[in-house]
Image (cartoon, rainbow, N blue to C red):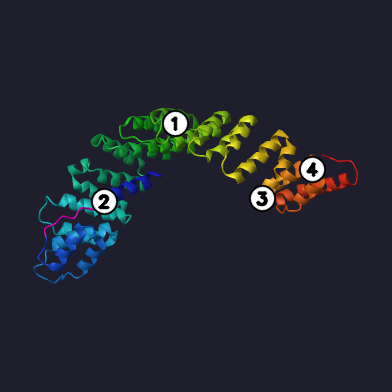
Amino acid sequence: MKISNLIVLLLVCMFGSAQVVFAQDEVDHLALATTLAADGHFDRAKLALKSVNLEDKNLDKQNFHLVSGLVDLNTQDWKSAIKHFKLLIEGSEKKADTPVYFEYYAQALYGDGQYSAALRNVEKVGPAANKNPGIWLLKIDSLTKLKRNEEAWTSINSAEKYLPDDIRFVRIKVQFLLELGLFSSAAQAAEKLMKHPKATAEDALALGEGLRKGGALKGAILFLEGARIRFPEKGNTKMSALLAYCYAQDGKYLAAAELLSIAAEDDDKFRIESAEMYIKAGKMSQAMYQNGLVQEQKSKLRQRVAILVDLGQYEKISALYPRLKRLKVLEDDALRYAVAYAQFQTADLRASLVTLKGIKDSNYFDSATKLREIIIRCQKNETCLN
């Protein structure tokens, strides 16, 4: 997950239901809207606000703009929220109230994509912002979107300083480093994250995948090996599989195969991949064993044929023909050609010709034509070329 997507998700969690706690106004529709908003019925509150008489001299306009702005925030009507919070700030006589109003205003600007303006207004919140995780999230993501990476980095470190128990900023730091391609630094930050008491197996998986995708295979392998020890049960199946993919990408197929066979104990879908890795490692007996444990029959048979072809065991391939036909696996022309070739090798020439007739894929059509010509010569007692 990209850092911007991660922060937006966190912001939605933080600000998705902005608190609405106000004294009820004497105007019925405003009072009704306030109550509805406080109960989370923002769409209904928005309708009630449309019925407020703005010409009423007794209307508390500050309260109206505040409730309207918060309802707009929660319904993501950013431009309307911007209008109401701007009027709220301009009409505020109590300076003690304005910091939180600037916070709301910044949220609306951020939602509308006005990141520079959002940052300017966040600065007006004052010292209270330092202990507000939502403001830090908004600030970091705005700076990131504006590609002001140095300032974003400074903000991430500041957020960690003021909110040391909040694991989200450690996660963001690692993701930030990964996106910049600073894999060595990301690995070091990941180690710090893993020491956090709130770190999870999901964190380890995300970080390991980030390192792998970035090509930092050595770092990913080292990190995931440690994470498997830290989380011996929860998430261990996925972690074993991810570590296996790292080993496979690094050309260590046997290690990958063994890890996938462990993962397959909990999830059968890894059996096929385990067998495939054993094939690449040249361990055909282990590959055959893993293949034998696969529950899904079509995938199992496709791979079984591939293994038998590598072993040159054509009689066994020919013997599988009835099952392959019954399960409609022969619709795969690559497999159909392999079976036809095996039938040819076992001198079942008529069956081979019948099997070849079904091939339509241009990738195998020429090979099928050549094999058909050889079979016809053999049937005429000419020299068989195999």
Which quadrant of the rendered structure holds the C terminus?
top right
Q: Which segment is the magenta one?
A: 18-23
Residue at the spot of label 4: 344
The structure residue drawn at horizontal position 64% and vertical position 30%, both measured from the top left corner, is 285
Q: Main secondary structure of the magenta part?
A: loop
The reply, left or right, for residue 34 in relation to residue 187 is left
Question: Which numbered tag is attached to residue 326?
Answer: 3
The structure residue drawn at horizontal position 53% and vertical position 33%, both measured from the top left corner, is 261
Which quadrant of the rendered structure holds the N terminus?
top left
The structure residue drawn at horizontal position 44% and vertical position 35%, both measured from the top left corner, is 208
The structure residue drawn at horizontal position 13% and vertical position 68%, both measured from the top left corner, is 28
Mark 3 and mark 1: Cα distance apart in space: 43 Å
Instruction: Tell me if mark 2 has few (under 14), some (14-19) or many (20+) residues whose alpha carbon lies within 10 angstroms of its own.
Output: some
| For marks 3 and 4 on the same chain, the one whose residue lies earlier in the sequence | 3
Mark 2 and mark 1: Cα distance apart in space: 34 Å
Q: What residue type is labelled 4?
A: Phe
In x, y percent, where is residue 167? 30, 37
Q: What residue type is labelled 3?
A: Arg
Determine if residue 97 is in view.
yes
| For marks 2 and 3 on the same chain, the one whose residue lies earlier in the sequence | 2
User: Does residue 46 sit above or below 352 in this rendering?
Assistant: below
Of circles 2 and 3, the one toward us is 3
| For marks 1 and 4 on the same chain, the one whose residue lies earlier in the sequence | 1
Of circles 2 and 1, the one toward us is 1
Mark 4 and mark 2: Cα distance apart in space: 69 Å
In x, y percent, where is residue 375? 83, 46
